[in-house]
Image (spheres, grey):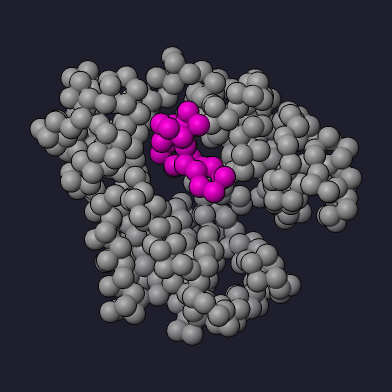
Amino acid sequence: MPKKPDFVGREEAIAHLNTLITNRNAKIIGIYGKGGIGKTTLAREYLQIQRLKILELNVGMDTEYIVSVKSWVKRQINEQFKQQAKKKFIDMLEQLKYLLQNEKGKVGILIDNLETALDEKGKFQQRHRDYIELITRVLNHPTVNAITLITCREEINEAKLSFIESYPLPELSELAWQEFFSIFEININTLVLSEIHKAYGGNALAMKVITHPIETYYGGSLEDYWLDNKQFLLKGQIKDLIASQFDRLFEHNRHAYNLLYRLGIYSYREIPRVQKIGLYCLLWDVKKSETMQVIESLQRRYLIEFEAGKYWLHPVIRAESLTRLDSLDNTLLLMKEEIDKLLVSDEKIQYFLEWLREVTLVYSDFTPLDFRAFYLCLEYVYSFGIFEQYEFLELASFFGIPSIE
């Protein structure tokens, strides 16, 4: 089986995780490292290799909109295990523990971007200490049939969580970079490769991002690319690299640029992965026949993450997109703020959005909807307490949203 291009050089990491789990009976492992080094990619790949049922808790990238543990536990009980969740948080934790204890196969749990919930000392912020209860009461219980991987940019500094095994993820080796570039038939000058690898500290995201310009603008020549960008690259700043890619998109592919920075508007909080329909909504100024071409242009550049028809931004790339949202229409930004407020405060809205994404739109052709209609739709849900699915269908029909019925 051919190697996945974005997973080269991680054989030792997989072996290390296996050792922690098999020889040291680790149930929870913290994978630590700087942004872009490949923590989440490793965690997902490992759980998939083990053929586990995966439950993912994406903490979120904005401290203001961190996922509530209570809402996540409730959603797993209701949707993954098809049970009615208890009302009290402590009862829900016991319920989830029981369900995991009685699961036929082992479950893989990924807690992603946990650093957002920590303070400057590596401790959980007071309002997010429910994470400790989830980890200690449920995930670390000896009878729970699950393995938990946590990705975080800094080590957790909680005495109650000292049982978490620590794995600082090393940078990708120069050999891994060489293997990656070879997959894309890039002509490699060993000296140049060594200098670029050193400049970016073996960062996996940097490796992927520079591939497209080398292929497209330098005929696959790593050396020619280096000659033009040496001074820039030696800064060794991944942020500068990403910013330069945004700038290049602005010059050469304005629609792709618009989509990339508009994608920052999604909080990736309760719904950490965006369906293709969500990207179409951001391409209101592009012909329907050209939308997929725009999306694919970002995929080729490794500027957007995607898997199984779902899309998201790497935290480093989203950070850059947010710095560029100032030029977006103020009305759209105000709508984002209002939608975020509703998402945080009202579970009915969360339920509606999940239903809208998974039931109404996934299997149907896209009918263009502007954000005003979408926001008005949310207002109706919020104002009139719409909660039943037949009411959702009526509302969707009223706004011209296609149904799978």
Q: Is residue 380 magenta?
A: no
Residue 19: image location, x then y, percent: 27, 73
Q: Residue furthest front?
A: 1
Residue at horizontal 30 percent and vertical 43 percent from the top: 204
The span picked out in magenta is: 296-321
Is residue 76 visible from the viewing direction of this image? yes
The front one of 21 and 212 is 212
Residue 221: image location, x then y, percent: 22, 25
Looking at the image, residue 33 lies above or below residue 36? below
The N terminus lies in which quarter of the figure? bottom left
Q: Is residue 306 magenta?
A: yes
Residue at horizontal 51 percent and vertical 24 percent from the top: 256
Q: Residue furthest bottom?
A: 143
Relative to residue 142, is residue 211 drawn left or right?
left
Is residue 380 visible from the viewing direction of this image? no
The front one of 126 and 374 is 374
